[in-house]
Amino acid sequence: MRRTPFELAAVATAAVPGLTPMAAASAPDDAADFDSALLLDSEGKRWRVRSPRHPEASARLETEFMILRAFAPAIRAELPFLMPTVAGTVRQGALSTFVYAHLAGATRSIEELSSCSDALAKEIGAALAAVHDLPQSLVNNADLPSYTANEFRQRKLNELDQAATTGKIPPALLRRWEHALEDVALWRFNPCVVHGDLHEDNLLIDGDSVTAVTGWTDLRIGDPADDFAWLVASNEQRFVESVLRHYTEARRDTPDGHLLRRSALLAEFALAQYLVKALAAGHSDMTEEAEAMLKSLADDIEEQNALAAEEAEAAAAELAASELAASELAASELAAPELAASELAAPELTASDGLAAPAVVIASEAKASEGGSAKPTVSVTAIPEPAEDPANGTASTPDAPSEADDTSTTALQIVEPAPLQDAKKH
């Protein structure tokens, strides 16, 4: 049962001795996992309360508590944003509720962020770069998950197999994702520290600045594309490219060339993970929502592929027409000397000239005249050119481009149903 902000305020007083809440309001969070509230105390200070809805969510909060303690003051000082600080915790049965000191800033919707200024895009890119440049020892010393590129890919293959067993994934999507995961070249990247649960609700914004990053429950070493999936899912190319440009400038290591392609795949695959999670929880409404979003995604991709095929066919036809025109032009240029030769004035030759030319045909029309000798009338025709070999004639027209592979940049462009943003947060 969901807890109200006032119930959470009462729990917070047990977690933080001396806290006297004067006002409470709901706070955005992963609704399937947490109940959250913002509190205002009698001294005018603000607090955030996160209460897990099930044991797994409670374990995530406890992991985050351990992670936050691993961030020494020296590491925090180098980050271009603030991180949460746990003020107190209280355990109720198998679940632990956490109270955090308030962080300035507010969340913005993905629509608001995707239309933001370049200055804010730079801040987001710099924040991502700072996370990915964190020392890997931070994760290893905290005994958090760490994956090589191949291990990460294999993990996704296992998750895909699990999703396929539900029988609720459209076959077109299964084939699409299988092809992408089998493309080994796509998964060559340098593992780094990743936030693991980054999305718009975990970024606090003030004006054109990123003031804080929250939600540190899934910190690990893995694929940097994990932290870009929510950006690609916005389907706002200008916004994504701007963030990526500033991210690349701020990072110590150069990002791999397939970063956004993997991000697009991971954004799509988030729907399959959402479906599996809904089925495991026995949540019928979430299951129906996941199935509807998967079907919508499959339909949108099919429409996109059909459009791409039409464009490819039109381009092939235009290329064939261009090749034919070029061939006809070349043939006409070759025939031009023949035409010129046929138009030359025919010289008059006498029998005494004794000239022999294969191109000369003599048609004698002897005329008898008094005292005169017979003189032939001479006409000249052009030398016939050898017949054009059909095999070496007009250049053959290239075959039409084949349909783009599912793992191409175009194939992995997200055409996202509106509910996808919500799905990634569950």
Image (cartoon, grey):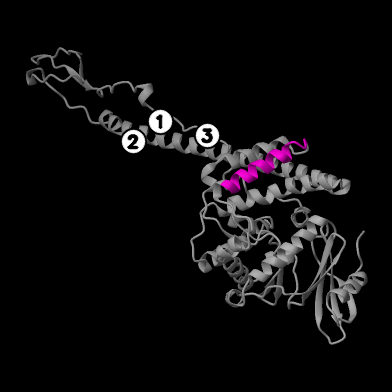
Dot 3 alpha-carbon crowd within 10 angstroms: few under 14, some 14 to 19, many 20 or more: some
Task: Say which of 350 and 107 sits in front.
Answer: 107
Residue 400: give its label.
Answer: 3
User: In terms of sequence position, does the residue under pointer 3 or pointer 1 come before the other?
Assistant: 1
- Distance Cα–Cα, label 3 vs label 1: 15 Å
**Percent position of residue 340, x then y:** 28, 33
| Secondary structure of the residue carrying numbered label 1 | loop
Q: Is residue 353 visible?
A: yes
| Magenta span includes 191 | no
Task: Say which of 95 and 252 sits in front.
Answer: 95
Q: Is residue 215 visible?
A: no
Residue 333: give its label.
Answer: 2
Q: Give the range drawn in magenta.
A: 151-167
| Secondary structure of the residue carrying numbered label 2 | helix
Q: What residue type is labelled 3?
A: Ala
Residue 226: name its quadrant. bottom right
Q: Which of labels 1 and 2 is toward the front? A: 1
Q: Is residue 263 left or right of residue 255?
A: right
Q: Which of labels 3 and 1 is toward the front? A: 3
Q: Which amino acid does label 1 sit on?
A: Ala
**Percent position of residue 160, x then y:** 68, 41
Q: Does 413 sit above or below residue 64? A: above
Tell me the residue at 57%/44% (across/down). Answer: 408
User: In terms of sequence position, does the residue under pointer 1 or pointer 2 come before the other?
Assistant: 2
Q: Does 9 sit above or below residue 150? A: below
Dot 1 alpha-carbon crowd within 10 angstroms: few under 14, some 14 to 19, many 20 or more: few
- Distance Cα–Cα, label 1 vs label 2: 15 Å
User: In terms of sequence position, does the residue under pointer 2 or pointer 3 come before the other?
Assistant: 2
Q: What residue type is labelled 2?
A: Glu
Q: Does 72 sit above or below residue 192? A: below
- Distance Cα–Cα, label 2 vs label 3: 28 Å
Residue annotated with mark 1 = 395
